[in-house]
Amino acid sequence: MSRIDWSKYLSYFSQINTRQLPVSEERRKQIENLLAELVEIPESDCSDTIGTAYGFGNDTEVVVHLHITLGSGAIANPAADFTGPLAFRIMREGRGNDTIEFLRQRVETGYPLNGPQHIHFQRSLGVIQRDGYNLVIQEWIPGETLEWLRLNHWNAHPLSGESAQEILRQILLGVVIPAWTVATVTSGVLWDIRDANFVLSGYEATSGQIRVAFVDTWHLRHLTRPVPTREGQIKQGLRRLQRRMERILLNQGQWEMRPTRFRQRFEQAFEASELTQHLRLLADQEPPCVKSVEKVCRDFLDELREQGLFRNGTIATKEDNQ
């Protein structure tokens, strides 16, 4: 009997465009035995399922959401003060060494953006190196990535205007502004703003509260390291941010037949907001002008609403039309 449910992990590679390949059956068995040892389940006891495996991220072989309560052994202490669900991020030794050192620093210092007050960033809670593997104990954030939702859910169940607006608000005010605020005048910025790096919780609830969280926290390393020039990172980050927002709005479904008109209205609102100029100031000014940039973001969302880019009511889904 398998100690880890691998079904979601294996299906990931058919649902998402990725250059990664699933780990071999032999390596999956190694990971099962390693986690069983760490969570103190005897090898003879196959009755407990340790957790569910997911595919995710560069240099990351497996993320395992734990289904069991940790014991008092090697991994209990790093996560002892955390009461939420836990996961292991598992990488082969030698491929994730830089990641491990950065995340170890993040655990020990709380910097950058690692604590209960930073609810839009996945928390790193502990680091273990054992048997040829680097492991990070981290907060488990339930939900799906924006990439998975775009490809497998919103195409059949379009986003409501209210949800689209809330997702954009959390990306801007909860992730981008805090991340660019903590950058120093000599460091890089958070530029890898991709759908695959955000998990959305609560998307299935009709009246529940949704939460957007940035989960590939390895990319926060750019905020701690000096760079000769960061203009390329700034341009890349702003381009990707604009593309994320555009895609979120398109996931409402109402613009499928007239994307040109949508893009014209979106780009006009984006340019008029001067959002890119204000975001640049966060990284270049000391102290950063956070309040003014937050106001610009809110005004931009208001303008999108006035332009009719957040849909009202419901539209027929593909399933309804069958």
Image (cartoon, helix red, strand yellow):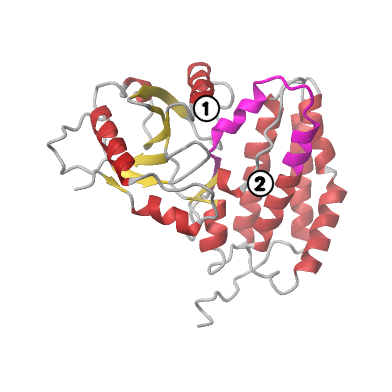
**Furthest-left residue in view?**
44
Q: Which residue is mark 2?
A: 169
Amino acid type at circle 2 is: Arg
Is 168 left, or right, of 229 in this rendering? left
Q: Is residue 204 visible?
A: no
Q: Amino acid at mark 1?
A: Thr
Q: What's the residue at 78%, 49% (across, down)?
A: 300
Q: Report the residue at 25% width, 35% height from top.
A: 33
CA gap between label 1 and label 2 equals 29 Å
Q: Position of residue 187 (x, y in %)?
A: 72, 22
Element carrying mark 1 = helix
> Is residue 314 left or right of 92 when viewed as pictured?
right
| Residue 13 horizontal/vertical position (percent) | 46, 54
Q: Position of residue 314 (x, y in %)?
A: 59, 71
User: Label 2 neighbourhood size at 10 Å, few (<14), some (14-19), many (20+)?
Assistant: some
Q: Which label lies toward us, 1 or 2?
A: 1
In the rendered structure, which disc, 1 or 2, sits on the residue that comes first in sequence? 1
In magenta segment, residue 225: yes
* Quadrant of the rendered image containing residue 281: top right
Query: What is the x, y in percent for residue 23?
Result: 39, 44
Q: Residue at 75% of width from left, 32% of height from top?
A: 291
Query: What residue does disc 1 label?
Result: 99
Does residue 107 sit above or below 214 in this rendering? above
Contact, mark 1 vs mark 2 (Cβ under 8 Å)? no
Task: Please say whether residue 127 is one of the residues in the magenta stretch.
Answer: no
* Span highlighted in magenta in the image: 211-238
| Crowding near the residue tagged with mark 1, few <14, some 14–19, many ≥20 C-alpha atoms within 10 Å | some
> Which of the two residues, 69 or 196, is positioned nearer the viewer here?
196
